[in-house]
C-alpha cells in the first residue's frame, strides 16, 4: 500500500517531521525546496488554518501537541 502525504496551499504536509515542504514546479528552476517547520510563525499559521478547516486527522492532531 502506498501512502501519499497531504498537500495544503501547494505545500506537502509531513506530520511525522512536523514540516511543510514546497518544491519548485520546474526541475530547471534555480529555487530550492522550501522547508517550513510547524513551530515557525509561517508553519503555525498554515497548521492553524488546516485545523480550523478540519483537515488534520484526529489521531495526528493528538500526537502534534
Image (spheres, helix red, strand yellow):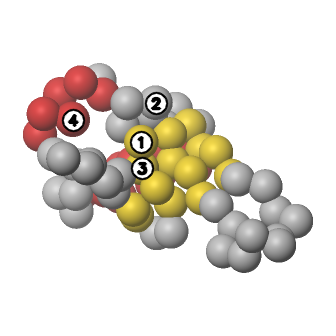
Callout in the foreground (1, 4) = 1
User: Which image quadrant is residue 23 in?
Assistant: bottom right
Q: Which mark is residue 13?
A: 3
Q: Residue at x 22, y 57 (%)?
A: 55
The CA span between labels 1 and 3 is 4 Å
Q: Which type of secondary structure does the marked residue at label 1 adopt?
A: strand
The CA span between labels 3 and 4 is 13 Å
Question: Callout 3 environment at 10 Å: few (<14), some (14 to 19), or many (20+)?
Answer: many
Q: Residue at x 13, y 33 (%)?
A: 59
Q: Which mark is residue 17?
A: 2
Q: Residue at x 50, y 40 (%)?
A: 19
Q: Quadrant of the C terminus?
A: top left
Q: Which residue is disc 4 drawn over?
A: 61
Name above or below for residue 1 compared with residue 52.
Answer: above
Name above or below for residue 39 compared with residue 42.
Answer: above
The CA span between labels 1 and 4 is 13 Å
Task: Verify CB contact (< 8 Å) between mark 3 and mark 2.
Answer: no
- Counting from the top left corner in percent of width and height, residue 45 is at 47, 51
Q: Which residue is disc 1 drawn over?
A: 14
Toward the viewer: 42 or 36? 36
Q: Which type of secondary structure does the marked residue at label 2 adopt?
A: loop
The CA span between labels 4 and 2 is 14 Å
Amino acid at each position: 500500500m502506498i501512502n501519499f502525504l497531504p498537500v495544503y496551499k501547494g505545500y506537502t504536509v509531513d506530520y511525522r517531521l512536523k514540516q511543510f515542504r514546497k518544491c519548485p514546479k520546474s526541475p530547471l528552476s534555480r529555487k530550492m525546496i522550501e522547508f517550513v517547520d510547524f513551530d515557525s510563525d509561517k508553519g503555525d499559521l498554515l497548521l492553524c488554518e488546516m485545523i480550523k478547516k478540519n483537515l488534520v486527522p484526529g489521531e495526528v492532531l493528538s500526537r502534534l501537541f
